């Protein structure tokens, strides 16, 4: 029994028990101290899953795809078509892969929060709870938004060269500070929206579970079913808004 | 009421008040979008995407309140 508990506590370190370096309650932690957190392991897990799935998808390329290759081609092709309709073929050629990756990664991250793989051994009993989704940490979503921020301005510079700066002072020069605030607020809201939605949903599920003995089982389960929909919508919204910001920056006169 | 009570109350007020406006706005937006979809079923796809974008923009306001509620909630000792 002790050996099992020992294994479980090691597993708790790997799968999201107490980490060496605890984050603050909502992850507003900008420290660069080295250390592992719960969500970092999940983050790497999602990364590994995506890499393995991608490698399996293209390992044996057949002209008539079957099985996993078929599914991957359907998913990536469908999303690329969706973004092509949204921002045009030229921008999709550069930013399409990034946007598709954002969509799939955020979707998988949101859904990873529903896996009951969080082993913990509080008071000697082994208990399972949901993993912490990486997207419910502000640092992660802020990182995503930073990538989008860089891509937006890269797209603007590439399409309009130095004329890109003109959009800051159009229609009048007085708009300059407001335009700058706008440029900063866009990625900030992008990060906050994803973080707030996923973190809020996880908190609601957690709180509903502790509400009363009668409702502790099925009420959070119902909320999780709603969470499936929310996770999909948030992944879509994030990649869609990123695409729109990029196309807006690229289309400036 | 001690300080913790005020933190709890302000967290509840932050999320409670900040949902009113976006709630009304999202209701109006989706009502109009559904109306448009019913009148012109051929542009349902475009309308749905645009509606989602608009809803996300409004949702951000409520999310600000939620984030502040979390921050205040974290202050409860």
Image: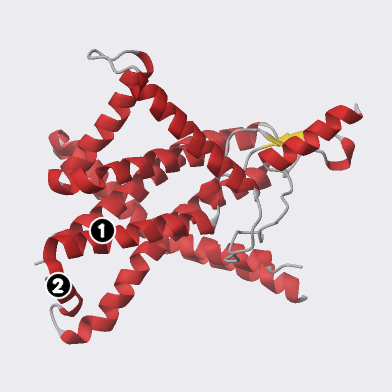
User: Which residue does the image show at 25% across and 64% down from the upper left?
Assistant: A153
Q: Nearer the viewer, residue A133 or A65?
A: A65
Quarter holding the C terminus of chain B is bottom right
Which residue is situated farthest in the left direction here?
A253
Mark 1 residue element? helix
On the image, the x and y values in percent for residue A30 come to 57, 66
Q: Tally the marks.
A: 2
Q: Quadrant of residue A15?
A: top right
Question: As rendered, which of A238 and A220 lies closer to the eye?
Answer: A238
Q: Which residue is mark 1?
A: A245
Q: Decide if residue A212 is on the left or right side of residue A218.
A: right
Q: Is residue A244 left or right of residue B62?
A: left
Establish if A48 lies above or below A161.
above
Q: Residues within 10 Å of mark 1 (few under 14, many from 20)?
A: many
Q: Nearer the viewer, mark 2 or mark 1?
A: 2
Where's residue A125, x and y in %?
A: 86, 34
Rendered image: mark on residue A100: none
Q: Which residue is mark 2?
A: A162
Residue drawn at x 27%, y 60% as measured from the top left: A152
């Amino acid at each position: 029994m002790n050996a099992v508990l020992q294994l479980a506590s090691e597993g708790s370190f790997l799968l999201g028990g107490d980490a060496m370096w605890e984050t603050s309650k909502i992850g507003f932690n900008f420290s660069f101290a080295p250390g592992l957190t719960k969500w970092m392991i999940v983050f790497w897990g999602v990364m590994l899953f995506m890499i393995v799935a991608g490698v399996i998808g293209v390992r044996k390329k057949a002209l008539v795809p079957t099985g996993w290759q078929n599914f991957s081609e359907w998913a990536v092709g469908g999303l690329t078509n969706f973004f092509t309709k949204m921002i045009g073929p030229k921008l999709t050629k550069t930013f399409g892969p990034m946007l598709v990756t954002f969509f799939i990664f955020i979707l998988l991250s949101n859904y990873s929060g529903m896996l009951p793989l969080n082993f913990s051994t509080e008071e000697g009993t082994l208990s399972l709870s949901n993993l912490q989704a990486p997207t419910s940490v502000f640092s992660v979503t802020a990182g995503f938004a930073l990538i989008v921020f860089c891509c937006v301005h890269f797209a603007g510079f590439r399409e309009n060269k130095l004329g890109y700066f003109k959009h800051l002072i159009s229609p009048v020069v007085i708009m300059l500070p407001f335009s700058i605030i706008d440029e900063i607020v866009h990625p900030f809201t992008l990060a906050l929206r994803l973080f707030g939605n996923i973190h809020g949903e996880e908190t609601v599920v957690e709180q509903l579970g502790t509400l009363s003995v009668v409702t502790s089982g099925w009420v959070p389960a119902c909320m999780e079913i709603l969470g499936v929909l929310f996770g999909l919508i948030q992944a879509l919204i994030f990649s869609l808004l990123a695409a729109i910001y990029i196309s807006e920056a690229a289309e400036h006169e | 009421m001690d300080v913790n009570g005020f933190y709890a109350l302000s967290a509840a007020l932050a999320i409670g008040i900040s949902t009113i406006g976006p709630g009304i706005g999202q209701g109006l937006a989706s009502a109009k979008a559904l109306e448009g979809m019913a009148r012109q079923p051929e542009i349902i796809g475009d309308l749905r995407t645009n509606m989602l974008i608009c809803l996300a923009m409004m949702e951000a306001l409520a999310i600000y309140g939620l984030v502040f509620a979390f921050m205040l909630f974290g202050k409860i000792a």
